[in-house]
Each structure stands twice: as structure tokens, then as C-alpha cells.
Amino acid sequence: MKSQRGLQLIELILVVAILGIVALVVVPRLAATDPAGLDLAAQELADALRFARAEAIRTGQPQGVLVDHDGSQAAYLDIAVYRVDTAASPFGIAALLYHPVDKQPYSRQIVAGSQSRGIGFANAAAPFSFFAVGGPQQHIHFDAYGAPILMQNGTPHRLLSGAVLLSLGQDLRTVSVQPITGRVIVQ
């Protein structure tokens, strides 16, 4: 009788261990296909663009956003909001702005964080194109009127098109900046 009880306890421990292992394997895969994380990442990117635009209007100085779609900007995370150094050629990042809520430098990771497992940038090229500027750019600036521009050699260049694509499996979200008004739209 005693050996029977011991065997049942061992069996119970094995079943719980197997269920635990299955849960560790299955739950992250289920979370990776949840489009709520994709919506959150798109909203965070849109908030960064809107904040830079609002700060440019408030201060009367150009403010910018870096969207590091390919990981080439090692000094910053996926998105960074900054004050533009117009004295530098073609332009420079004078200083990161501070996030309005947590008061930390506004450099955020949106595609590789724990909340964004499986989310990536779907843009093959940089997301912003400007008049008279060779090739797409990772940076976008906003002037004192909130218009999207790129400062180069002290000259503002108007936005032709701007869309950042975020993906999670087959799901896509587009965060676009309207060329004349600077309005940010999440689709």
C-alpha cells in the first residue's frame, strides 16, 4: 500500500512538470501572435512623432525623430526624439528630449522589448523621403509650424512621403506622416 501512494505522488509530480514545460513552450507562441502588442508598438511610435511635432510648435525650434528601422544607429534604440542641431551639416542631434510622462531621455525600444516579442519593422528602406534629398532617410524633423521637414545644410526639405511599417506575422500596422500638415495616422 505504501509503494502505491509513493508511485502516485511521483506520477503527479511528473504530470505537473510536463504541464509546466508545455506551458513554457506554448504561451510565448500565443503571445507572439497577439496583435495588441503590434497596436501598442504602433501607438508608441505615433506618440513619439506627435510629441516631436508638438514640441517643435511649442518651442519654435526644429525637433526630430529617428526611426532606426535597421539597427544601424547603435547609440539609440528603435525610436529617439531629439532637438535638431541646425548648425551641424547636414544636421545633428543636439540632445534627446525627455519623455513627458517618465521624464527619461526619449529613446525607446519598440520592436525587441518583452512586450513586443515578434514585432519588427517591415520597411526594407528608410521610411521617410524628402524633396531634393538623395535617398530615403531614418530621420524626420518638424518645423515651428509642425510641418514635416528634413534640415540639411541649414535648408529645410519638405516631406514627400513618410510611412513606417510594423509587422507581427501576417499583421501589419502603418504609422504615416502626412506631407504638408505633419498629421500622424496609425492604420
Image (tube, rainbow, N blue to C red):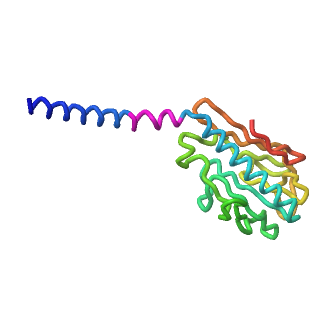
Q: Report x, y in % for residue 35.
A: 61, 34
**Residue in the foreground of this view, choosing between 136 and 163:** 163
Q: Residue at x 68, y 64 (%)?
A: 103
Segment colored magenta: 23-32
Report if residue 114 lies within the magenta region: no
- Residue 72 lies, with reference to residue 117, above or below; the image says below
Report if residue 30 lies within the magenta region: yes
Q: Quadrant of residue 102?
A: bottom right
**Residue in the foreground of this view, choosing between 160 and 62:** 62
Q: From the image, which quarter does the C terminus lie in?
A: top right
- Residue 71 lies, with reference to residue 82, above or below; the image says above
Q: Quadrant of residue 56?
A: bottom right
Q: Residue furthest front?
A: 1
Q: Report x, y in % for residue 169.
A: 57, 32
**Residue in the foreground of this view, choosing between 155 and 47:** 47
Q: Report x, y in % for residue 61.
A: 85, 65
Q: 37 left or right of 185?
A: left
Q: From the image, which quarter does the N terminus lie in?
A: top left
**Residue in the foreground of this view, choosing between 137 and 111:** 111
Q: Residue at x 62, y 59 (%)?
A: 76
Q: Residue at x 89, y 47 (%)?
A: 181
Magenta stretch, main secondary structure class: helix
- Residue 80 lies, with reference to residue 43, above or below; the image says below
Q: Report x, y in % for residue 155.
A: 87, 61
In the rendered picture of this protein, how many numbered marks are placed on residues? 0
Q: 101 left or right of 142?
A: left
Q: Residue at x 14, y 34 (%)?
A: 6
